[in-house]
Image (cartoon, helix red, strand yellow):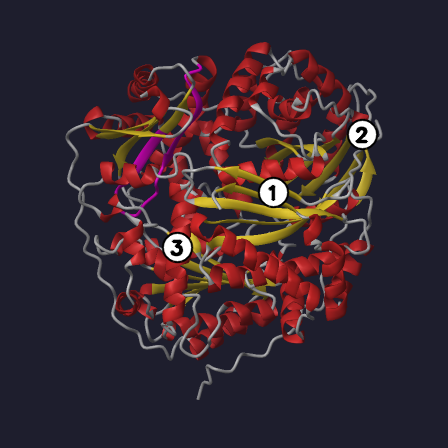
Amino acid sequence: MANYHKSGNLIMKQFRNSTIHLSLLPMVDFNRFTLSNGLRVLVHEDATTPMAVLNILYDVGARDEDPEKTGFAHLFEHLMFGGSVNIPSYDEPLQRVGGENNAFTSNDITNYYITLPAENLETAFWLESDRMLSLAFSEKSLETQINVVSEEFKQRYLNQPYGDVWLKLRPLAYKTHSYRWATIGKELSHIEDAKMSDVKAFFHKHYNPKNAILVVGGNVKTEDVKKLAEKWFEPIPSGEKYLRNLPQEENQTEARVETVRANVPLNAIYVAFKMPGRLSNDYYAYDLLSDILSGGKSSRLHNSLLKEQQLFSDINAYISSSLDPGLFIVEGKLVEGVSIERAEAAIWAELEKIKTELVAADELTKVKNKVESVLVFSEMNLLDKAMNLAYYELLGDADILNKEAAQYLKVEAEDIKRISKETFEKNSSSTLYYLTDEHA
Amino acid sequence: MLNRTQAPDFKQVSTINFIQPEKTFLDNDIAVFTTYSGEQDLVRIEFIFNNVNWNPDKPLQAIAVSAMLNNGTKKFSSKEIAENIDFYGAFFQTEYGQDQSTVTLYSLNKHLASVLPIVKDVLSDSQFPQKELDIYIQNQKQKLQVNLQKNDILSRKEFSHALFGDTAYGVDIQLKHYDAVKRDDLLDYFKAAYQPDNCTIIVAGKFNEESFSLLNAQFGKNWEKSEAVKNNFSFEPSKRTEVYKEKSESLQSAIRIGQLAVNRKHEDFAGLQILNCVLGGYFGSRLMNNIREDKGYTYGIGSGIVSLKNAGYFFIATEVGTDVCSAALTEIYKEINLLKNELVEEEELELVRNYMLGSMLGSLENVFSHADKFKNIYFAGLDYSYYENYINKVKTISAEEIRNLANKYLKTETFTEVIVGRK
């Protein structure tokens, strides 16, 4: 069955597969150069596969949208497949050479990727460079993709139990920052109202060599990639570097609460706390904190709230890993008959515990070991490696990927306690009660 | 001057190399198939058990045993098992499939000696404590309640039940089935299914003689054998069935249509996969082009061929706006009839050939994928000539053959058509 693509929102934690690098572990090696138009290019040679990957990250996401035209970065991603200035169809020529492609949009970035037999790599350069040069801007494509994205909106957010949680939780947790809307957009009408003039303006503002990072990986040689990059991408005018200047969120000083009632079978609770952005030194501690609370069946929330107290049938904690200050979320579905007050109090009791008692050495080692495993296993996937290189290059240097292990290892029990204290405060929490109609 | 309108030269994939596993035996005759790779210091070990002793009155036996395996032995509590596995950074997963149940261990090589004894304890001595079972039942019922609100899930359940009735392939699990689960039934099933005579081990990764000794020391002895009857099902040919479940508040309707076909063992299977690819098996397929990319009725539509041990089936699935539900159905049947009446043009067929070959090459990404390819044929009772034939068929199939297959297998007069939502 085909995997629907040209699509969707970045799943939370997708980029968490960074993690521990011990000295024994293989590194993700790469070479790097910059074209005269400013396009950054990274090459990861991996001769164990007959395939190649071409991944291109554009430094634009839903956070860069006009508040009156939300969902646009994602809609635009769909339009990138509607033909480019010299090539009427994007998908067809790629499939003809045995390739596949996909893309995703998050609040921070838009990422496109191609996998294909390495000997046909040039086709990927041809296609990808032409749509960076210019799109076809077809009215038919705009009209169709508005429909497709509207159906996506319904399928994933409106026609699912609890599907609209993030449409409610984001504007509760963020009041100023553009993270207050989801990548799909605030409402269907924003997508329906998109105009070709908006499409063109968005393209010129964000889609140029200065705002992109290209990664080529697999059975390729840096020399050859360099020649292909110079041939296909270097003639593209550099464009203007987009300078981001987003209004930042002010410190939250009061607990926020909202109640939603809907036709769902179970009561649910979502609590969001503010945490620092992806580049903060404490990011790694937060990542481990979420694992201690909710990483698998030995985690605290699972054992205490689901198994021992049997208050929840489903309980999770995770971080949003966003570039600007993000969210630490605790969410759960309540066992029938349990009151929302009791369930909420039990979550807070666990949070209080981690704020006041040091995590035991074994427990911390456990989550670090897990992170190490995740890293080694993630090296088996060429596409993951290519995506990660592009993302870390955006963070400032692709080599951060190879240095993160040390960052995780440095985290101490005191750090976990300190950040828990800083984070798990009623006054900076946003709580969404998602209640069934019947229990109203 | 660079000519951007001219596509670069390309080649069709010519050779695809499959890494075949090495077969060895543990002391108690369990077959171990090892695909070796020294790239990373890790290993994946899968313990695969046939599903057995099917009893339609207890449809959750195998499912609940699979889900609850790691919930306690005489030696370890559920929590201790999880803590031990997690401490070594290992991953322990259980998966129920329609023909086999699989227990998978992912581990770094350096921790293998520490985690294998835990896995052995779980596979040979799970106790299914009543308290854990009660929690499982309560939480599964809650999950099912949520799932029963999803049109897509409902359409799958209706579709499978229409094709396969109350067999393991088709049984429609309801809340009452969970209420009827008894600990003794789980213990019975565990004893019958999770035992050496019903076990195959598939290993992929850095697995040397020393690792084999560790595996043999744990699983090659002190594991009691027992008897069981492998599940075996047969099915009546499909007949036209229409199921409509109205959901008055739905914004989208889930559509699922299809019928019984053949499985991997049948000579038509490869050709059928190519036919499926043309119709709805990739992003550039006819269904996707028409119903998403031209009409904008849906976020996605696709078709698939599924090979089970005792059956094969074909399906088309999508979720569409309720206002265009009947228009979408008309287009789906139109595309099917086109394939039955007209020849696929050479240009499209050539594209599909190249796409499928590239896709096969790309699906052999690492040592795990090579082991997965082996499982596909091994559990179907086939050998590597299956892939040779497949590749050859993709390269050589004619448009006439595709049209004949469409007429043979896409018989709309015997389709099952399920719609959940509004039409």
Q: Is residue A35 left or right of residue A91?
A: left
Q: Which residue is identified by label 3?
A: A149
Q: Which residue is identified by label 2?
A: B230
Provide the chain ID for the residue under circle 1: B
> Where does the magenta region start and end?
A310-330
Q: Is residue B77 visible?
A: no
Give how far apart the Cα atoms at labels 3 and 1 are. 43 Å
Q: Secondary structure at mark 1?
A: loop
Q: Which residue is identified by label 1?
A: B41
Q: Nearer the viewer, residue B256 or A77?
A: B256
Q: Amino acid at mark 1?
A: Asp
Q: Residue at x 62, y 27 (%)?
A: B115
Q: Amino acid at mark 2?
A: Lys
Label 3 CA crowd tier, 10 Å (few <14, some 14–19, many 20+): many
Provide the chain ID for the residue under circle 3: A
Q: Are marks 3 and 1 in contact (CB under 8 Å)?
A: no
Q: Secondary structure at mark 2?
A: loop
Label 1 CA crowd tier, 10 Å (few <14, some 14–19, many 20+): some
Q: Is residue B196 left or right of residue A186?
A: right
Looking at the rendered structure, whether the residues under marks 3 and 2 are on a common chain is answered as no
Residue B325, position as x, y percentages in the image: 49, 51
